Amino acid sequence: MHLLIPHAAALSDASMHTLRGLELPQLRRLLARLSPTRCDGSDEYTLTPPHERALAQALGLHGDDGALPWAAAQAAADGVDTQALAWGLLTPVHWQVGRDQVSLVDPSELKLGDAESRQLFDAVRPLFESEGFVLAYGAPLRWYAAHDTLEGLPNAAIDRAIGRNINLWLPQHPQARLIRRLQSEVQMLLYNNAVNDQREARGELPVNSFWLSGCGKRQHAHPAPEVTVDDSLRTPLLRADWPAWADAWRALDAGAIAALNARAAGEPVMLTLCGERYAQRLEPAPLTIRQRLARRWNAPEPRTLLETL
């Protein structure tokens, strides 16, 4: 079994302070059983975050930074006939305009329903189709677009941009000029849309743009057995809600990590912990009896490892 945990750490002072006060007994026991092996990543400015790269490796997917073809894989899972086209994921979003910057709100906070999403999708569809795109609806937060210019087009994962200045993460590649123009046209189109008028009347955020990610043609994945992604740390971390993030870590420690610990007593298991910069894989390693005893009584503190991610 392979457990992959995104958003296990962040680089902010508040995150580091939270980690130092966090007791994770099950993770500590697991670290005594497993040894660090592959560590993948570089810095916090890669377009593909470490957890996406680690999952792609586990599934046998390949692509350059920001160009892992997640959209085609998700579209196929949503029943879209992807053919041999290059697909991108269009996530309907709200761009929050501030005094000094434009930031991206977590799309889950929109609470966008299927009926509203389909109306907005139908409103923007002609803009894309007039430029030769093929569009498909997958779910309220999953619209898909196919076009030759999307093949190999690098884009930042939406998790990189949420809560941050989007100018740092908008695509600058020459192939992205058409997308940047469509973003502007979509913003103008949605400004007076009836769905958004109704949402604002209810005190909800309007959908005023989209985020493109996961571009490329579909690849055939070769999933490793029992790869499980536990995303429970994602929302509180992206909201910078550190008390909630600490609570989520404790629940994860008592739940999925405790279950992995129990399995580790009788079978090989793997754990991958992912922060903003690195994904650290931990696996069983041959140890002498003396090394096992030493680890049992001197297991590394989880925060020591998590602070390096």
Image (cartoon, helix red, strand yellow):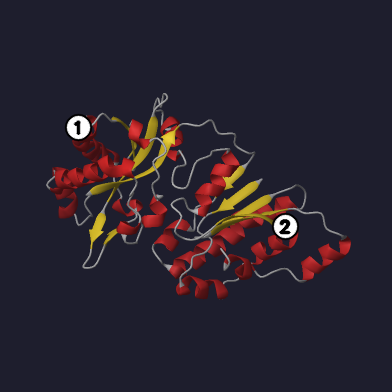
Q: Residues within 10 Å of mark 2 (few under 14, many from 20)?
A: many
- Residue 135 percent location from the top left of the image: 30, 31
Task: Give the numbered dot on residue 77.
Answer: none
Q: Is residue 184 left or right of residue 175?
A: left
**Residue beneath disc 2:** 34
In-front residue for pair 33/277: 277
As drawn, which residue projects farthest toward the right? 289
- Residue 180 percent location from the top left of the image: 26, 45
**Residue beneath disc 1:** 126
**Quarter holding the C terminus?**
bottom right
Circle 1 — which element?
helix
- Residue 231 percent location from the top left of the image: 50, 52
In-front residue for pair 299/26: 299
Circle 2 — which element?
loop
- Disc 1 or disc 2, which is closer to the eye? 1
What's under tag 2, amino acid-wise?
Answer: Leu
Q: Quadrant of residue 87?
A: top left
Q: Is residue 84 left or right of residue 178?
A: right
In-front residue for pair 49/117: 49
Q: Residue at x 41, y 28 (%)?
A: 79
**Quarter holding the N terminus?**
top right
As drawn, which residue projects farthest toward the front? 174
Q: Is residue 145 left or right of residue 61?
A: left
Q: Is residue 78 left or right of residue 185?
A: right
What's under tag 1, amino acid-wise?
Answer: Pro
- Residue 262 percent location from the top left of the image: 71, 53
Q: Residue at x 53, y 48 (%)?
A: 53
Q: Residue at x 78, y 66 (%)?
A: 295
Q: Are marks 1 and 2 in contact (CB under 8 Å)?
A: no
Q: Separation of disc 1 and disc 2 at Cα?
A: 53 Å
